[in-house]
Amino acid sequence: MAEHTTNYTSTFIEVAEDCPTDHAQEPPASPSMSAESVPTIGALHYRMIAEHPFERTSDDVIFATWALRRGIDPDDVQAREDFFSKGQACLRASPLGKRYGWGVLSDAEGRVTLVPRESEEYALLAADPALGHTRAMRSKRA
């Protein structure tokens, strides 16, 4: 069974062209803000990447988010193989770059970190010709 991947290497995912904020924001923990709600996808992505910069790949973040929201152990190897047996949306589709103003930098090994759009680091990365460049997906069609 072929395995698909969402990983990028040496690539900077810039915020979406229609991102509504000019500075990075931490996503809300849950839609209703109650402690018993399932965390939002944005909150899970943010926590996994911000608390462990350059420790996880996009695949790690995408699968763990999917698993946690469904009550599946993120370390379940068979569930991960099944999940990646078909294509999945990558971090370009994450609310982090679409709505909350975070760029996502992937290193040469595919491990990711967040970069706030208002930072000097973001401007330098966005202009770096040594990196691949793409944008987070737009929220609305043009």
Image: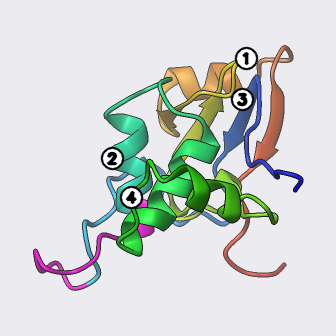
Say which residue label 4 marks: 73
At mark 1, the secondary structure is loop
Residue type at the position of mark 3: Ala
Give the SS element for disc 4.
Answer: loop
The residue stretch that appears in magenta: 32-42
The answer to the question of whether label 3 and label 4 lie on touching residues, with beta carbons closer than 8 A, is no
Near mark 2 (Cα within 10 A), the count class, few <14, some 14-19 or many ≥20, is some
Structural crowding at the residue carrying mark 4, measured as other residues with C-alpha within 10 Å and reported as few (<14), some (14–19) or many (≥20): few
| Of pointers 2 and 1, the one earlier in the residue sequence | 2
Disc 3 element: helix
Q: Nearer the viewer, residue 131 or 39?
A: 39
Q: Name the residue that disc number 3 marks.
A: 126
**Location of mark 2 (residue):** 47
Taking the spot 72% from the left edge, 80% from the top edge, the residue there is: 140
Query: What is the magenta segment's predominant secondary structure?
Result: loop
Spatial distance from mark 2 to mark 3, Cα to Cα? 23 Å
Proximity of marks 4 and 1: CB atoms separated by less than 8 Å: no
Question: Which secondary structure, mark 2?
Answer: helix
Q: Residue at x 38, y 64 (%)?
A: 68
- Residue 10: x %, y % from top left: 76, 22
The percent position of residue 7, horizontal first and vertical second, equals 73, 40
Does label 3 or label 1 sit earlier along the sequence?
Answer: 1
